[in-house]
Structure formats: C-alpha cells, structure tokens
Amino acid sequence: MKLSFRWYGESDPVKLKYIRQIPKMRSVVTAVYDVPVGEVWSRESIAKLKEDIESAGLIFDIVESVPVHEDIKLGKPTRDKYIENYIENIRRLAEVGVKVICYNFMPVFDWTRTQLDKELEDGSTTLVYYKNQLEKMDPLTGELALPGWDSSYKKEDLKDLFEEYSKIDKEALWGNLQYFLEKIIPVAEENDVCMAIHPDDPPFDIFGLPRIITDENNIDRFLKLFDSPNNGLTLCTGSLGCTKSNNIYEMIDKYSAQGKIHFMHVRNVKILDDGSFEESAHCSDCGSLDIVEIMKILHKNKFKGYLRPDHGRMIWGETGRAGYGLYDRALGASYINGIWETLEKLK
Ligand code: DNO
C-alpha cells in the first residue's frame, strides 16, 4: 500500500511540511489548478508541483483529478479537441513520473453534500447529505457553492448544461464514456499510466442528471468497455458505501483480486434511516462501514496501489476547506496505517 495525502497546492492551508510529518506518508495527491477544465496543463506548472513536493521529502506520482470537460461527457462535436488535450495531459504527467490519474464522469457536479459544517455531538463539524435538504436545493439559482463543484459555472452556463443533459440518457452517457476510453487508454498504456475512475458520489442521480458509476453491475460494465490493466478504479469507500444496496466488501475483494483498484479513498459514513448520510471519523465504530474489514480484504489481496485517507471532520478548532483539513485526515492516515502494520505483523 502506498500511503498518500491530498493537497490543493500552494494556496492550501495544509502545508506540505506538515503532511510529511504524518508517519509513513509517501505520496502527495494533487493537480494543476491554474487552467480551466479541458485545457492543457503547462509543463511549468507540472514541474513546480513536482519540485515543491519533492523538496518537502515526498513523492509526486499520482494525480487527482484531470477533470473531463462536459463536451466529452455530452458527446459534442467539440469533444475531440478536449480529448486531444486530455491525452496531452496524460503524456505530460507521465513524463515527470506520474503513475496513476484519478478522474470522474459525473455530469456537471462532482461530489455533492447538502451541508458542510454539521455539528456532531462531540463539537466537531462534518459534511452531510440530507435528503430533505437536497429537495430544497435548486442548482439553477446559482446560489449554491459546494466544495466539489466547479464554481466557475455561471448561472447561464448551468442552465444551458442542464438543457443539454436533458437530451442525454444513461445509455448515451455510457456511449460517450466508451468513446473517451477508446481514445485515452491506449495512450495510458503506452505511457505506463493507470487511469482510475472515481465512482459517482453519491451513487445515484441527483437533480435529474444521470449517474452511471454507481454499483457492481455498472462497474463490471465499465471495466468491460475497455479491457486493459491501465483501465481501472479509484475505489471510494464512502461514495459506494453510502447506500446499503452496495456491498462494498464484496466489491473491494473482487476488484482488488483482479488488480483493478489503482487508488483507494478510505473514509467512513453513517447511513441514516431515510437514506441520508453523515461523514464520520475513519474508525470502524464511528460509522456504518467496517474499515478494519476493508483493510483486511486489501491486505489479503496484497494491495499495492495508492491509498489516501479521505475526508475528515473539522476538529480541534481547525478551519479551512471542508473535509480537507489536516488534523482528522492525519488521524485517519495513522489509524489506517496502524491497521495495516498490525496485519503485516500478524502475517
Ligand atoms: C471528493 C473527491 C472527489 C474526487 C473526484 C475525482 O472529495 O474524492 O472530488 O476528487 O470526484 O475525480
């Protein structure tokens, strides 16, 4: 297992020197944030990331995310230009030693929560998805700002996008994903890069927009779209595990045994009776997922990919990017690492 930690670049209040102090930390997961979605990343910006990360004593060999332009997901005639740019980004990242690229294929919005600062009993705050809050949200008012969303959308752009997606059903989205994979995976193969799709979060349609990377059947279908060791998964326990209909233990067992998991996102969620959920601390008893069991399965299958502790709560008075503070994620890293070390010693 290659322990890694997400970092949002120079403007991130979480500093690389602190990430380095987390025991056994290896790789920094980041991206170039200075160009709009769909454009080519400059070699200078990529080199700067590598230099900053390496001078902090860490490794730059995994990227999250190279985002996919909406025209690709919509299958518009302009998609080929954006796919060319995407391919160029794969090449440029491979040149500096990047081995895994995480991305997703969710229409318009990335991961979605309804509140970023829900106070828990212990006084910490966390990210939640409450169905009754979602029902009251209207993405077209342009007043919503959630951390996973591309805030560069203007009200008008969103309206147009929703209209375009109203003509796209799930089958069309599958077709557009296949078209994309057929172009990018051969390039990933040539450049020794593994592409790792992130599941949809949450794994069901929201605001009437189709979502397809949601469950075992669909992930099987995805892997068959282009059968290659370089076409694999980011397996996010909290995304797939926030609904009881997914058996994430079986999924992790199956896909890690097949060598399809290039990147693990590990976090816990507490599933509520109405299907809402709250993000909780990483430990097994803190939420609905058994993290020890997850780590046991990965260990049994000799998981050698990258793993990062995913979202943490805000604790100890820390402020900053919701879900991505230092303290709780560092606790999560140490908890996960402790399980792994124990499994290694008991071998
Ligand atoms: C949430 C993240 C996602 C993820 C993208 C991958 O915290 O896991 O934003 O980075 O969906 O493309």
Image (cartoon, rainbow, N blue to C red):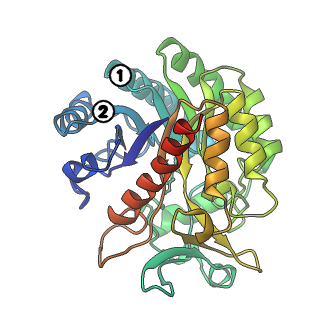
Question: What residue is shown at x 67% (from left), y 61% (from top)?
Answer: 289
Secondary-structure class at tag 1: loop
Q: Residue furthest front?
A: 346
Residue 75, visible in the rendered structure: no
| Amino acid type, callout 2 | Ile
Between residues 13 and 68, which one lies in front from this camera angle?
13
Residue 328: quarter of image: bottom left
Q: Is residue 89 left or right of residue 57?
A: right
Residue under the point 79% across and 36% down: 220
Q: Is mark 1 within 8 Å of ligand 1?
A: no
Residue 264 sits in which quadrant? Answer: top right
Between 221 and 29, the one lying in front of the other is 29
* Amino acid on which disc 1 is placed: Gly
Residue 59 x, y percent position in the rendering: 30, 33
Query: Neighbour class for label 1 at 10 Å: few (<14), some, many (≥20)?
Result: some
Q: Residue furthest top?
A: 190
Which residue in the structure is indicated by mark 2?
A: 59
Residue 79 makes an appearance in the image: yes
Residue 246, position as x, y percentages in the image: 78, 55
Residue 141 lies, in percent from the top left, at: 52, 78
59 up-or-down from 128: above or below: above
Which residue occupies 61% across, 55% down? 291
Residue furthest to the left in view is 55
Kindly indicate whether the residue at mark 2 contacts the one at mark 1 (C-beta within 8 angstroms).
no
Q: Is residue 42 left or right of residue 82?
A: left
Q: Secondary structure at mark 2?
A: strand
Q: How many marks?
A: 2
In front: label 1 or label 2: 2
Q: Earlier in the sequence, mark 1 or mark 2?
A: 2
The span from disc 1 to disc 2 (Cα, nearest Å) is 10 Å
Residue 97: image tag: 1
The C terminus sits in image quarter: top right
